[in-house]
Image (tube, helix red, strand yellow):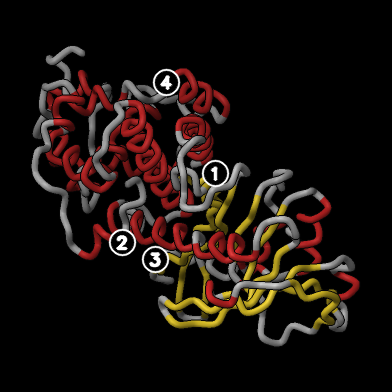
Amino acid sequence: MNTERTVFAQLVDFLPMHTFRRCVKKYHGNYKVRSFSCLDQFLCMAFAQLTYRESLRDIEACLRAVQTKLYHMGIHGKVSRSTLADANESRDWRIYADFAQSLIYIARGLYVNDKFGVELAQTVYALDSTTIDLCLSLFPWARFRKRKGAIKLHTLLDLRGNIPSFIRITEGKVHDVNILDELIPEPGAFYIMDRGYIDFVRLYILTQCSAFFVTCAKTNLKFRRLYSHPVDKATGLKCDQTIVLTGVGTSDDYPEKLRRIRYFDAEPPQKLTFLTNNFVLPALTIARLYKCRWQVELFFKWIKQHLRIKSFYGTSENAVKTQIWIAISVYILVAIVKKQLRLELSLYTILQILSVTVFEKSPILQVLTEFAGKEPEDECCKQLSLFD
C-alpha cells in the first residue's frame, strides 16, 4: 500500500465507490452542483464522525488547516461551514441511507460465520429502538411530547457480528410495534423482541411466513395450558408449556398454539416468561436466545457514546437523517476494515486509533497493528466490546 497516502484516503478505499455513484445518480444528488459534490459532503461528515468534531465550524477549521492534503483524501471541493450546511439541508438523505444499506450487505457477508453465544444455524435478529432527545423549538418536526422533541432509531440487529440489517428513523411518538409492519420476515430466522412488540396479529404474520419469534410475555396474558413438558429446574427453568390464547380478541388474532417458558435468571435475579412459536429448540436455548437481545442495547449505547448522533450539525429532518445515516456508514465501514484486515482489536480501539492518525502517511494496517498497549479495561469498554 502506498505510504504517501493518508490513513483517511486508505480507509476510503474500502468504500464501494461505484455503488455510491449509483446512489447519487438515483436521487440526482449532484444536479446543478458545481464544486462541492455528494462525495465531498460524505467524506467531510465521515471525517467529523471519525475525529469527534463538535460543529460545522469545528469541521471547517480542522479541514482548512490541512488544505494541501484534502485533494489526496478525496475531498475536491472547497470546505466551508455554509456549503456543508446547505448540502446537509438539501441533498436527499436517502442517498446515504441506500449507501449504508450496501455497506451493511457487505459486512453481513463478512460476519456470516461469526458466533454470538448460542450454537444455532439460523439467522438471529434482535429488534429494538432507542430514543434520541431533541429540543422541540429547534426541531419542531420531531414532536414527541407536548414540550419535548425526539426521534426514534428502530433497529433490527443481526447478532452475527452485531450488524444492523434494518434501520428506520421516525418521530419519537411512533410506537415500536408499528415497525413490524415494515419488516419482510425471513423464513427460518429468529426475531428476538421485548414485550413492547407484542401484537398477536403481527406476530401471527411472522408465523405464517415461517419465521420464529421469541418475546417476553405480559403479566396479564390470558391463556389455557394444553401440555406441560419436563424441565431441569437446576438450570433455572420453571416450566415449558404448550398453550392457546383465551383473551378477548387475542384468540382470534393468534389462533394457533404457542409455547410458554418460565425461567429464573440469577444475574440479575429476575423471573422471566417467554413466548415463542418454536417448539423444536430446547427451552434453555430459548432463554439464552432472549438474553442475547441485550446486544442491541449495547449497540445503541455504543453508537451514542462513540459517534455523533446525539448533537446535530443541522436542525432540519433531512440534515438529521443525513448525519445519522453517515454515522451508521462509518460504523459499518470500520467493521468491514476490522474483518478484511483480520484485526483482533475491538471496534472502540480501532476508532480511537483512526481518530488521531487520519492525516498520517503510513499503511493503515501498520498503523492499526502497531498498537502494542493493552486495551482499556474500564467499565465502558467491558460493556461495549461488541466485536471481541
For the residues labelled 2 and 4, say whether their Cβ atoms are less than 8 Å apart. no
Between marks 2 and 4, how big is the CA–CA gap?
34 Å
The answer to whether residue 31 shows anywhere in this view is yes
Give the quarter of the image for residue 37.
top left
Q: Badge 1: few (under 14), some or many (20 or more) residues near its Cα, within 10 Å?
A: some
Between marks 3 and 4, how big is the CA–CA gap?
35 Å
Identity of the residue drawn at 73% across and 50% down: 211
What element does badge 1 sit on?
strand
The answer to whether residue 250 shows anywhere in this view is no
Q: Badge 2: few (under 14), some or many (20 or more) residues near its Cα, within 10 Å?
A: few
Q: Which of the two labelled residues, at mark 3 and mark 2, occupies the earlier sequence position?
A: 3
Q: Compared to 320, does 26 lie above or below? A: above
Give the quarter of the image for residue 350.
top left
Q: Which of the two labelled residues, at mark 2 and mark 1, occupies the earlier sequence position?
A: 1
Q: Which residue is mark 4?
A: 17
Q: Nearer the viewer, residue 113 or 240?
A: 240
- Say which amino acid is labelled 3: Leu
> Nearer the observer, disc 3 or disc 4?
4
> Nearer the observer, disc 1 or disc 3?
1
Q: Which residue is mark 1?
A: 165
What element does badge 3 sit on?
loop
- Say which amino acid is labelled 1: Ser
> Nearer the observer, disc 2 or disc 1?
2
Q: Which residue is mark 3?
A: 138
What element does badge 2 sit on?
helix
Q: Which of the two labelled residues, at mark 1 and mark 3, occupies the earlier sequence position?
A: 3
Residue 357 located left or right of residue 157:
left
Q: Which residue is mark 2?
A: 383
For the residues labelled 3 and 2, say whether their Cβ atoms are less than 8 Å apart. no
